[in-house]
Image (spheres, rainbow, N blue to C red):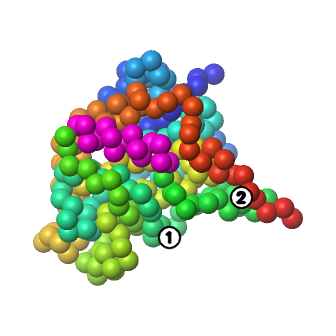
Amino acid sequence: MTKANIAIIGGTGFEALLKVTKQIRIGTPHGLPPLISIGKIDRKTVAFLPRHGVNHSVPPHRVNYRANVYALHGIGAKRIAATNAVGTVNVNFKPGDLVVPHDLIDFTRCRQLTFYNETPVTHVDMSQPYCPEIRGLLIEKAKESGVRVWDRAVLVCTEGPRYETPAEIEMFRRLGCDVVGMTGAPEAVLARELEMCYATLCFVSNLAAGMQRRLTASEVVGVAKQKLPIVQQILRETVKHLPKDRHCPCAHALRDARLRG
Ligand code: HPA
C-alpha cells in the first residue's frame, strides 16, 4: 500500500514539483479524486493531488473536496501544503505577489463542507485555520526566494465559477478580506476535521473586480504559468525543511470537538 506523509494540493502543472514514481487512483466513500502522483522531494515521499483534475477539467464549485482530502488522509498524509491563485482585494497587494493567509472567510454556498453529518456531532476549532508550522516555513522559504510575500492575509473563498462583481469585492474589502479565490474552502476545514495540518501559498494573479476594467480567465492562467517555478521551489523547500514530528495543535483537532449524545 502506497504511503505518503506529506501532500501537496495544487493546480494542474504542479506535478513537475516532484520526481513522480507512480500515479494512484483511490476510491473513497465520498467519490473518486483525481489521479494522485507519488514521488520524492529530497528523501521524503510526497503525494501531489491536482485539485481540478489531471486536465484541469473540474471547475472550483464542482471539485470533490471531501474525496480529495479523504484520499490523502487514507494514504497516510498528515500534512497538506496547498497553493491557490487569488485575486487581490487589498489595494497594497499586486499581481505577482505571494500571500500566505492566516485567516479564512467561507463565502461558498453549495459545497459539501464537512465529514461529520452524523453523530457524534463534531465542531472543530478554527480559531487558527491554518497550520502555524507549515505557514511559518512557507513564509520563511518565500522570503528567502526574494519574491514579495505577504505573511498575513484574510482569504475569502467565493463559490464561483464566475468572478465577483465590484460591489461584492467592495463588501469583502470592508469586511477585512485581502485576497479572493474559489478553492480555499472547504479544503482547509476538511483537513482540520481529519486532524491534518494545512496551509496555503497563494499567488496574486489579478486585481479583483472593480479594480481593473475587465477580468479574464486567461490573465489568471498567464500569471499562474509565470509564477509556477517560484511557487514550486518554495513548496519544495518547505517540504524539505518540515520536521519529522508535528509541533502544532492540528494533530489534536478532534480532542474536545465532539458532543456525546
Ligand atoms: N476572484 C476569485 N477567484 C480568483 C480570482 C478572483 O479575482 N483570481 C484568481 N482566482
Closer to us: 144 or 71? 144
- Residue at mark 2 to residue at mark 1: CA–CA distance: 24 Å
The answer to whether residue 93 is visible is yes
Closer to us: 88 or 54? 88
The answer to whether residue 35 is visible is no
Q: Position of residue 113 (x, y in %)?
A: 58, 60
Provide the secondary structure element on which disc 2 rests. Answer: loop
**Which is nearer the N-term, disc 2 or disc 1?**
1
Residue pointed to by mark 2: 257
Tag shown at residue 43? none
Q: Position of residue 82 (x, y in %)?
A: 42, 44
Tag shown at residue 109? 1
- Residue 55 belongs to the span the image colors magenta: no
Q: Position of residue 140 (x, y in %)?
A: 33, 41
Is the CB atom of the residue marked by disc 2 within 8 angstroms of ligand 1's nearest atom? no
Residue drawn at x 86%, y 65% is 261
Quarter occupied by the N terminus: top right
Q: Please rate how many residues cluster around mark 2, counting C-alpha atoms within 10 Å: few if below 14, some from 14 to 19, many from 20.
A: some
**Amino acid residing under circle 2:** Ala
